[in-house]
Image: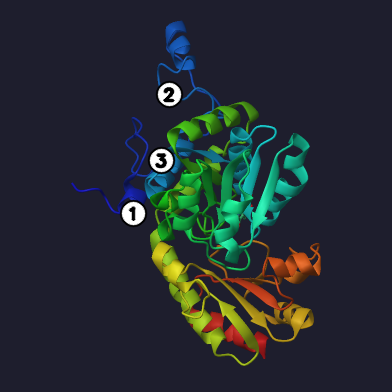
Amino acid sequence: MSTPHFETEAIRTQIERSQFLEHSSPLYLTSSYIFEDAEDMRASFSEEKERNIYSRFSNPNTSEFVEKIAKMEGAETGYAFATGMSAVFSTLAALLNSGDHIISSRSVFGSTHSLFTKFFPKWNISHSYFKIDEVDAIERLIKPETKIIFAETPTNPGVDIIDLEVLSEIAKKHKLILVIDNCFATPYIQNPIKYGAHLVIHSATKMIDGQGRVLGGVTVGNADLIREIYLFSRNTGPALSPFNAWILSKSLETLAVRLEKHSENALKLAEFLENHPNVQQVKYPFLKSHPQYEIAKKQMRLGGNIISFEIKGGIAAGRKFVNSVKMCSRSANLGDTRSIVTHPASTTHSKLSEEDRLEVGITDGLIRTSVGLEHIDDIIEDIKQALS
Ligand SMILES: *Cc1c(COP(=O)(O)O)cnc(C)c1O
């Protein structure tokens, strides 16, 4: 058989069946595993044997989930975490030493920004930010202490796109580790390793779960780097729970079909918004008007499910819009079957100064929409009545 396709791997990658010959992978709720004898135990602990010892290190459900994500991303191996943030923190903390420096896009998830600005300085780890439209300036930020380039694409909540090929060329030239938070794209839409990224991180809480049920995170990539991340994590304990791993692995079986439909709905809504008189600007990767449309087309299979748009009338209009939706949810989550609207300027990013907010593209009337799987006519109808 030729190399199976994405959908096939997502469904047919399964841990070994037990003596009950179950069709679907069972849930292994066990904190530890037993050994045949003292020699088996010695060989397992010295890693002469690859097997489960304790569920902080590994668990069959977690292994199945990681193996699927690794195949989907074209990665050698990986490790799964309790949340997306524990994946981001543990990945970076495992690889960085006191005195090291990170270069990152300024448009990163809020807690990642807090990690760089509030917590890493405690361990003498510094950072420099580049703006989305200044990728060419990255080389000027490189110092002798620089170790990692970190970026998200598409960005949250601005839905800006960064050229993975350009980042990877810079990382290669200067022997830096390129780490991509691929949460918004999912492994179905974009595979950063193909472009030269060393590590790919996901918050599995979002589209990978896809139904707003459990938290999870995962990092996949280069085996030597994952080994360091594994050793750090096995000792510090951010492991994913087997129950969540079981849910997330089952979710991956439908990732492809879900993303096709999410993206189809999102494109239709984006086209509707683009023609609405109360909307100033719409940003969706697969709209021709997106400033980085060509890059999006190059590195993404589909546009995904997140749209950002600017409503006319500033902060007050943004709040009014959020208050006026009837079906869409007001929620901080995204990547759910249920469509969700948020107004970052008055919520998630309200603590930023106006200048900082505008620098990451969060204008007063910006609305972030996570387009769900309800019928597109119902989604458009709700957004339409809220806009008027
Ligand atoms: C949500 C999110 C995270 C954090 O994930 P959690 O599972 O909530 O910890 C990290 N990066 C991006 C881009 C996200 O959207």
- Disc sitting over residue 293 in the figure: none
Residue at point 49%, 49% (across, down): 248
- Disc sitting over residue 6 in the figure: 1
Residue linked to disc 2:
51
> Could you tell me which secondary element the residue under label 1 belongs to?
helix
Which residue, as the protein is rendered here, is positioned at the far left?
1
Closer to viewer: mark 2 or mark 1: 1
- If you read the primary sequence from the N terminus, does the residue marked by circle 3 or circle 2 appear first? 2
Q: Amino acid at mark 3?
A: Glu
Q: Quadrant of residue 309?
A: bottom right
Disc 2 from disc 1: Cα separation: 27 Å
Residue 20 point in image, percent of width and height = 34, 33
Residue linked to disc 3:
67
Seen in the image, is 346 located left or right of residue 231? Answer: right
Disc 3 from disc 2: Cα separation: 15 Å
Q: Amino acid at mark 2?
A: Arg
Q: Quadrant of residue 275?
A: bottom right
Marks 3/2 in contact by CB < 8 Å: the verdict is no
Query: In what quadrant of the picture does the C terminus appear?
Result: bottom right
Note whether 375 is above or below 239 in the view shown.
below
Q: Amino acid at mark 1?
A: Phe
Q: Residues within 10 Å of mark 1 (few under 14, many from 20)?
A: some
Residue at point 76%, 41% (across, down): 121
